[in-house]
Image (cartoon, rainbow, N blue to C red):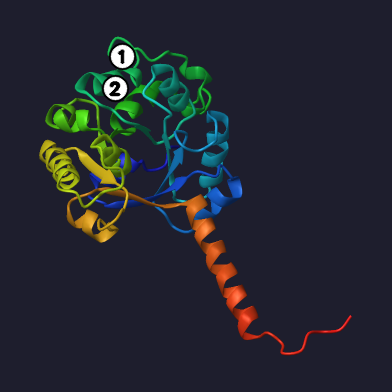
Amino acid sequence: MRSQSVKQQLRSGARLNGCWIEAFSPIATEIMAMSGYDTAMIDLEHGPGSPTEAVVMMQALSAHQCKPMIRATSGDPAVIKRILDIGPLGMMAPNVRSVQEARDVVAACRYGPDGFRGAAPALLRATGYGENVTDYEHWMTEEFLLIIQIESKEAVDEIDAIAAVEGIDMLFIGPSDLSASLGALGQFGSTEFIEAFEKIEQAVLTSGKYLGTIPFSDWDSQRLYSNGHHLVLAGTDTLLLREAAGRDVQQLRQACRNGSWSVSPTV
């Protein structure tokens, strides 16, 4: 029996939070899930893992309420097929730049005649290795969350038409790549970036599709939710570990300085 999907939660009106899985450590992933995040985005684009390792991460998440999704390395149909076959509840295609690319991502997620995904449903983890074949195509259409990332000037120029593409559920803004595409990497306060970001927000919300992004610069989670975002992916396992370890080392060094003996011990 399938658990409640991310799309079901969004349809109910929930505003969701989530984290990024970059380390591809089952223990770290389990800890992230235990922390209470609504969903986890297993990152095959920037993380070092493979689809096989992504399965292990989903298994680590499965004992908790944290819903697994996967960011693909690209919108290539062969890449998308392998991700869908292992059974995440949602998938994010990075850097979709045009209406045609958005349509191609949708087609790669659907069996013929509506798409060109290779069909072998009885073999897939996504169908329980054949136990849920009969309802799988319906589940994919109704419950699978298909996300595309908007993170280029080209996509901003076509944003109204991209947001209108049937089959896309959520548009997720990638602020870093968007700023780079605008010629000002990390300059989130520039007029051009702010106008582009707000244009995307407005177009997506007007279209009736779901909207998401990450917290950055002055756009903290509260501001994003207030602006209408449905999903905010914040914590990253590697960064949280680095920051926590760094704080611990600083505290230890400060304690050592404060508690230093005035006389060195003899050997």
Q: Quadrant of residue 181?
A: top left
Residue at the farthest right position: 267
> What is the C-alpha distance between the residues marked 2 and 1?
7 Å
Amino acid type of disc 2?
Val
256 on left or right of 117:
right
**Is 241 or 178 nearer to us in this picture?**
178
Q: Residue at x 29, y 9 (%)?
A: 113
Depicted 177 relative to depicted 124: above or below? below
Q: Quadrant of the C terminus?
A: bottom right
Q: Position of residue 145 (x, y in %)?
A: 32, 35
Task: Identify the residue under disc 2.
Answer: 106
Q: Position of residue 77 (x, y in %)?
A: 39, 18
Q: Quadrant of residue 180?
A: top left
Does residue 33 appear in the picture of this structure?
Answer: no
Label 2–label 1 contact, CB within 8 A? yes
Q: Residue at x 48, y 53 (%)?
A: 239
Residue at the farthest top position: 113
Q: Position of residue 175 (x, y in %)?
A: 28, 44
Q: Label 2 neighbourhood size at 10 Å, few (<14), some (14-19), many (20+)?
A: many
**Is 27 or 150 nearer to us in this picture?**
150
Amino acid type of disc 1?
Gly
* Numbered disc 2: secondary structure: helix
Q: Label 1 neighbourhood size at 10 Å, few (<14), some (14-19), many (20+)?
A: some
**Is 52 or 202 nearer to us in this picture?**
202
211 on left or right of 237:
left
Depicted 97 relative to depicted 242: above or below? above
Q: Quadrant of residue 41?
A: top left
Does residue 21 appear in the picture of this structure?
Answer: yes
* Numbered disc 1: secondary structure: loop
Task: Identify the residue under disc 1.
Answer: 115
Q: Residue at x 53, y 24 (%)?
A: 129
Q: Quadrant of the N terminus?
A: top left
